[in-house]
Amino acid sequence: MQYNDFGIDFKYLMVNEKDRKFGITVNTVGFQPVQPDTNYPSPDHPKSYYFKPSRCRVLSEYQLIYITKGKGVFSSETTKKRVIEKGSVIVLFPGQWHTYCPDVSTGWNEYYIGFEGSVIDTIVKSGFISPNNQIIEVGINEDLVNLYSNAIRAGKKEEKSSQQFLGGITLHILGLILLAADNKNLEDNGNSQIIERAKIIMAENVMRKIDIKEIAENLGTSYSWFRKAFKNHTGYSPAQYFQELKLKKAKELLAETQLPIKEIVYDLDFSSYDYFFSFFKRRAGYTPSEYRDLGKVPKR
């Protein structure tokens, strides 16, 4: 089974003059899994973003592209062609030609966010990121994936002041990238990166049924070692952690959608409605219906 392969999920956003006064605006945010031996990039993207890797591209915005699976290559006006491994962030700069693509034998998973504004211009001028250092090694980081996921969710909702919220997430993403890069412990990288990778696989497949033993095998470790190391790292067994992710997703669906509760139970692959009901009440302190009602605005 191929894990860590949510479908393509992206959003292109509208920006008005008031938004621009905030100093940072987000134009696009998304996630794209690219399977081995498939065309890249997806033709679903607008013409201003679509490109052929053999011809290069120039953007009018900054982008932060986080590779969490697979490998590929990148080159730009200031960077010679080099291999990109999972755990790398590609930083793109406006007005600079560049090209990148996954290896056809592995594909890759990419999270990305595109943005612009005076705030990020100042950050660049101050040297925190530079066209001379476009590949930043951060390792596999669940917190970073969660930030990208939150940005995708916020972009799709398009609520009032969502641009300001997205600008804050963008700065948080950039800050975490710099923190992770500067404090990356290479000696301890092996075991912790396996666990971080497993956590991301679970997060990206929360709507599916997963096989913990198969995840351990795919990550190149024994199930007994993986189960023990995972609990030492997170405080949960792998199965318990996955159930907590399902609980978090159930809360999100109850609060942010009108999906029937039975449909949520089915989509999250709980064994039965009765099990979901008791599990949710035990862990959240409310029944699913009560939790949904908490988020409703009272009628006047």
Image (spheres, helix red, strand yellow):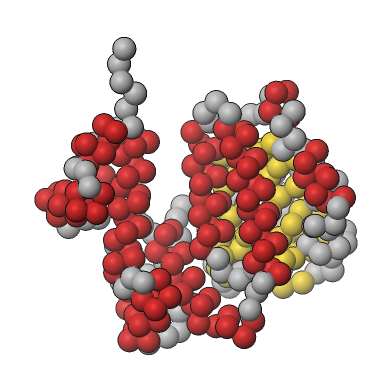
Left or right placement of residue 159 versus residue 227 in this view: right
State the residue in front, 35 or 228: 228
Left or right placement of residue 154 versus residue 122 in this view: left
Q: Position of residue 121 (x, y in %)?
A: 82, 44
Residue 46 visible here: no
Q: Which corner quadrant holds the C terminus?
A: top left
Residue at image point 72% right, 53% down: 52
- 77 w.r.t. 9: above or below: below
State the residue in front, 44 or 289: 289
Residue at image point 37% right, 36% down: 256
Residue 287: image quadrant is top left
Q: Position of residue 78 (x, y in %)?
A: 88, 62
Residue 246: image quadrant is bottom left
State the residue in front, 43 or 25: 25
- 254 w.r.t. 3: above or below: above
Q: Position of residue 81 (x, y in %)?
A: 80, 69
Q: Position of residue 54 (x, y in %)?
A: 77, 59
Count of labels in the image: 0
Q: Which corner quadrant holds the N terminus?
A: bottom left
Left or right placement of residue 48 versus residue 240 in this view: right
Residue at image point 77% right, 72% down: 82
